[in-house]
Image (cartoon, helix red, strand yellow):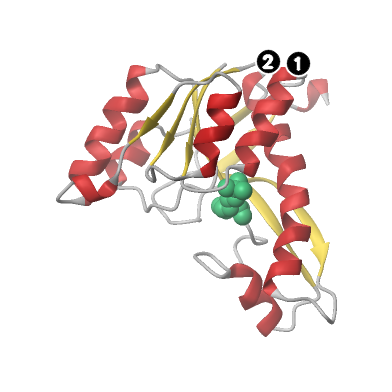
Amino acid sequence: ARLVVLISGSGSNLQAIIDACSRGEINAEIAAVISNKADAFGLQRAKNAGIETRVLSHRDFDSREAYDAELMTVIDSFAPNLVVLAGFMRILTANLVQKFKGKMLNIHPSLLPKYQGLNTHQRAIDAKDQVHGVSVHFVTEELDGGPVVLQAKVPILSDDTAETLAKRVHEQEHIIYPLVVKWFSEQRLKMEADYAVLDEKQL
Ligand code: GRF
């Protein structure tokens, strides 16, 4: 598969996917990494791995529609089979989501459908949850609402802060995101109607 990865920040999930590709665990090539922030550390990770990068700053556009139209053109120029959102902190327009329907994945740091949106770790602590986690899902027009493919759970400990909990969740992110990208790259994973469907034959 040909992947395009979208980031806004540190890119530790990007790194996990780069590493899984270079170890031969994922049969895919990362064609490009696109960031909406010029100072995203993930861009450096991409360059270190010899991957093409593009910066598309939302500040250069008058509207979300104009930004997403250009983003679509840039993504398309790399002709990916799969678009991987890895900490891309932008809400996408319906047009863009429609265009990559069934071909776009996101990782969200909660056990969806709980805690869509931001500050998920603090919200889980405040709610006195004992379990928290992370979800990889297909992207649909509903923010953090598309069909879930895989989740990992972690305990919430009594002395956890948002930071210590986020760290525990991140370790799981780096395991489950490459795994889902691997399944997609092997054409074992599809979005059908509102469901993620995994071909069990090769499990
Ligand atoms: C992760 O917590 C991910 O779940 C969320 O954004 C963060 C990205 O982290 N969507 P990184 O840039 O991959 O380190």
Label total for image: 2
Q: Secondary structure at mark 1?
A: loop
Q: Where is residue 77 drawn, in percent x and y?
A: 33, 18
- Whether residues under marks 2 and 1 lie with C-beta atoms below 8 angstroms apart, the answer is yes
| Location of residue 28 with respect to 197 vertically, above or below | above
Please tell me which residue is depicted at 79% across the width and 58% down the height of the picture: 153
Residue holding disc 2: 27
Q: Where is residue 81 drawn, in percent x and y?
A: 49, 20
Q: Where is residue 36 drawn, in percent x and y?
A: 37, 44
- In the rendered view, does 99 fall on the left or right side of 147? left
Q: Where is residue 73 drawn, in percent x and y?
A: 27, 26
Please tell me which residue is depicted at 63% across the width and 20% down the height of the picture: 185
Q: Which quarter of the image is occupied by the C terminus?
A: top right
**Residue 107 appears in the picture as rendered:** no
Task: Tell me the crowding category of disc 2: few under 14, some 14 to 19, or many 20 or more residues within 10 angstroms, Cα based.
Answer: some
Q: Nearer the viewer, mark 2 or mark 1?
A: 1
The residue sitting at the left extreme is: 62
The image quadrant of residue 159 is bottom right
The image quadrant of residue 98 is top left
Q: Say whether mark 2 is within 8 Å of ligand 1.
A: no
Q: Secondary structure at mark 2?
A: loop
**Residue 199 appears in the picture as rendered:** yes
- In the rendered view, does 53 fall on the left or right side of 178? left
Residue holding disc 1: 24
Task: Tell me the crowding category of disc 1: few under 14, some 14 to 19, or many 20 or more residues within 10 angstroms, Cα based.
Answer: few
Q: Which quarter of the image is occupied by the N terminus?
A: top right
| Location of residue 54 with respect to 135 vertically, above or below | above
- In the rendered view, does 101 fall on the left or right side of 107? left
Q: In front: 7, or 186?
A: 7
Q: Amino acid at mark 1?
A: Gly
| Location of residue 89 with respect to 99 vertically, above or below | below
